[in-house]
Image (cartoon, rainbow, N blue to C red):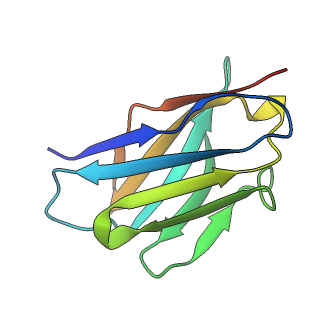
Amino acid sequence: QVQLVESGGGLVQPGGSLRLSCVGSGSAFSFNAMGWFRQAPGKQREWVAVFTSSGSTTYADSVRGRFAISGDNAENTVYLQMNNLNPVDTAVYYCNGQKNGVNFWGKGTLVTVSS
C-alpha cells in the first residue's frame, strides 16, 4: 500500500520559514511527479508546486519567489522550502504523488503563520 507521510509543519511568525518533507513508501514504482497542495480553513484545496521526474518545477503565482520545491522522484521524496511566510499561507499542506494519472495523497501537515 502506497503511503505518503508529511512532516515539518508548525507555528511560525510572519516573515519566517519552514521546510516541509514528504516521504513515500510501499510502492514498487517511482512517481512521475510529486508536489504540494494546501487547503486553508473554509477554502478549497489548491495546488502549490510540482516537481517532475525530469527535474522541472512549477509554482502557483501566490508562492512563486517565496517557496522552493525539490526532491528525488526515484526515492519518492519531495520537500517544500517556504520563506517569507505570511498569514494567508496558513493551511494544511498535502503531499501529492502522481503515477500514470493516478493521484496519491498524504494526510497533511498543518502550517500556521501567526504572531
Considering depth in this image, is 103 or 68 the residue closer to the camera?
Answer: 68
Query: Of all residues shown, which one is farthest toward the bottom?
Result: 54
Task: Please report the residue visible at 47 percent of the width from the left and 66 percent of the height from the top.
Answer: 71
x and y percentages locating residue 84 in the rendered image: 83, 46
Quadrant that contains the N terminus:
top left
Query: Can residue 81 be seen?
Result: yes
Considering depth in this image, is 12 or 36 the residue closer to the camera?
Answer: 12
Q: Is residue 95 left or right of residue 48?
A: left
Query: Can residue 44 be seen?
Result: no
Quadrant that contains the C terminus:
top right
x and y percentages locating residue 39 in the rendered image: 61, 31
Q: Tag count in the figure?
A: 0
Indicate whether 115 appears above or below 15.
Answer: above
Indicate whether 55 appears above or below 7.
Answer: below
x and y percentages locating residue 92 in the rendered image: 57, 29
Q: Is residue 90 left or right of residue 75?
A: right
Indicate whether 83 appears above or below 30.
Answer: above
Considering depth in this image, is 70 or 100 the residue closer to the camera?
Answer: 70
Task: Please report the residue visible at 67 percent of the width from the left and 19 percent of the height from the top.
Answer: 41
Query: Of all residues shown, which one is farthest toward the top?
Result: 42
x and y percentages locating residue 26 in the rendered image: 16, 50
Task: Please report the residue visible at 71 percent of the width from the left and 28 percent of the height from the top.
Answer: 90
Q: Quadrant of residue 87?
A: top right
